[in-house]
Image: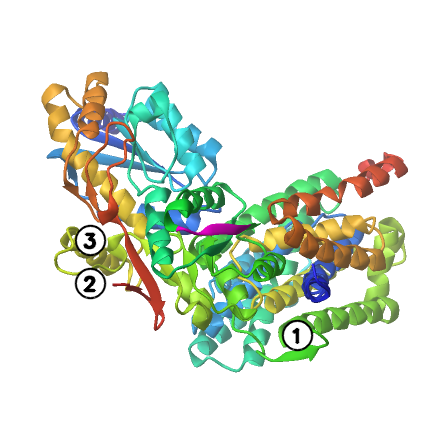
Amino acid sequence: MTFDIVLWLAQDGITNGAIYALLALALLLVFSVTRVIFVPQGEFISYAALSLALLQAGQVPGVVYVLVGGGLIAAALDLAKAFRSRVWSKIPLVLAAYVAFPCAMAALAWWAAPLKLDLVWQVLIVLGLVVPLGPIVWRIAFQPLANASVLVLFIAAIAAHYVLQGLGLVFFGGEGLRSAAFSDARFALGVIQASAQSLLVIGASIAVMIVLWLFFGRSIYGKALRATAINRVGARLVGIRTELAGTLSFFLAAAIGTLSGILIGPITTIYYDTGFLIGLKGFVGAILGGMASFPLAVAGSIFLGLLEAYASFFSSAFKETIVFLVIIPPLIWLSLRSRHVEEEEEE
Amino acid sequence: MKARLALFALAAAVAGAAQAEIVVGVSLGITGPGASLGVHYRNAYQLMPKTLGGEPVRYIILDDASDPTNAAKNARKLISEDKADVLMGSNGVPSAVQMAQAAAEAKIPMVVLTPANVSGNVLHWSFIVPQTTELMMGAIAGEMKKKGIKTVGYIGYTDTWGDLVYKATESHAAAAGFKIVTNERYARADTSVTGQILKIMAANPDAVVVGGSGTGGALPHVALVERGYKKPIYHNHGTVNAEFIKVGGKNVAGAVAVTGPLVVPEELPDSHPTKKVSLDFTQRYEKAFGAGTRNAFAGYAYDGMLLLDAAVPAALKKAKPGTPEFREALRASLESVKNVVGTHGIYNMDPKTHNGLDERARVVVQVENGAWHYMK
């Protein structure tokens, strides 16, 4: 193993690690605010990457049906609730968010697909198509049981994962797709060449982390989310609407997942079920960070990416075994440290 | 009430009529990880004739979600509830093996649609349609021998398929005069194969053999080309479809693979024994499912039907469908079918291996101008 192989693998590991880090942040965010272990996180990666590849091929991505259909179900749930409580003031907002916007995005995708617009516009359309699915999934699957135990929420998350993955198979088909590279440029970096694509992934990940940091540190919504994460009851007492916190955190998670999908689409072949495994590795990254600290989750994910890269060089047949083996020590440590808090179950 | 009674009567009549037909129980992985192949297999059943050896036939197609446990469950359901006379399936090797075991237990013949390895009593009841991996990789070994290739790098799936292709390639190594210098593994859903590719590049073999399938075969090929690997890259028969080229783009130009003749029937010489059958099936398939949808997998399902079609008349002489005697007769008849011209090749069932294909069932193809073409 020569020095340049070490560097090549490091570049590869850090690129993948940056994606895992983004997903780890999203998972951690959703978990700390809503206590949902967000298994369907990975589906946003597949949806985004496949939608972008289809738009580039001039086809309308099938995700438009998922978006419009999901929006209608979410709106129906809210309308039924309004009907029961006789509070009609929110109806225009509900219709705008769950019906008008998805339909407008679907129409836009329909119109734009054959035109093969510039990459920037295609990326924006994909964001507009896939990100709203986050709040929609929250509204349909999780909001009705927001106060249930972690285990019930986890089961609901697995159900949502299977539904979304099944829809992915129906609308994208079983074969994989690869979207066109944003740039074929390569830069000489000492003995190795860094591709523009992997620099973009790392740069975008750092940018997202800075934005998240500013959002949670400076904005009122970010602070409200943090307050909800620290103490739900207390947050509600001081006037924070925990329902909104759920919508917001799922929106952010979907946005991060979609962005990851757009970034990774040109690097590898994405299948309708690829996202799940990538999301799972983000989850491993978050666990390596103790499932509590954002910086540690990022560090854990980068470590995981590097471990994966070197494992695939030394013993490719056992790569996944090695990668998933490393979560056992942190899990043992976490379960030894934690006292089993019974009151959480009662809430 | 009257209407309901009438319905009962109708149902009884239908059930009575149904006893005269042959029931073929099929389980395929139409969803799950094997879906990209399973869908092609299922499509083939829409093109099947309504009779088998002149007798009406009913195909019952179940989805096993590419899960061997489900495949076994489906097989038992098809045997006990639907009273299947013969089973067909599945598109994953582990699923097919599970079905074959269930079929052997119930003494029902089973037409295996993947190159599965079974033996003993299970093989007694199983008939394997596709070319063996050894037969297919023999063509690749022949190509490599022609080019004077001495060292070969291997990268394949971490699953059974990766093992099968590796062993098949290795079995020809001595005769073709090459040595396999790397045995790297990857998974279809991997985001990167950089580590494996770097290891292959460090060994610097004369050629690389990829043990992937479908679009999954493109990932190592693209990574090799991007890292500047200029020597030949060979693929197995699981890789040949249009999506592979769509995903790989210009990077997979020049990729060489082995496949069945029905992928390039137009370019075959007129003397090729299966040209007519292969061309007819490919044209009908593309008419039904769109241009460019041709693939080897639908052909296996269709050839399975052709084998049954050839075997049923002899079995019908001995017993009626729906009886154990018919199943035993069908098994015996399947074992001795001769010169059945299929889409993939000429089937002469070998009573020892229960696989009937020979060298005529393989052609070498290459990616040129964005499509697979016959390599003369």
Colouring used for the render: rainbow
Task: Inspect the image, locate mark 1, and give the three-letter code of the amino acid beneath it.
Answer: Gln
Q: CA distance from mark 1 to mark 3?
A: 47 Å
| B64 relative to B205, above or below | above
What is the crowding at mark 1: few (fewer than 14 residues within 10 Å), some, or many (at least 20)?
some
Task: Inspect the image, locate mark 3, and give the three-letter code of the amino acid beneath it.
Answer: Ser
Helix, strand, or loop for circle 3? helix
Q: CA distance from mark 2 to mark 1?
A: 44 Å
Is residue A7 shown left or right of residue B316? right
Q: Residue at x 66, y 43 (%)?
A: A321
What is the crowding at mark 2: few (fewer than 14 residues within 10 Å), some, or many (at least 20)?
some
**Quadrant of the rendered structure where residue B164 is?**
top left
Q: Which residues are magenta?
A: B177-182
**Quadrant of the rendered structure where residue A18 is?**
bottom right
Which one is closest to the eye, mark 1 or mark 3? Answer: 1
Looking at this view, is B213 or A214 the one in front? B213
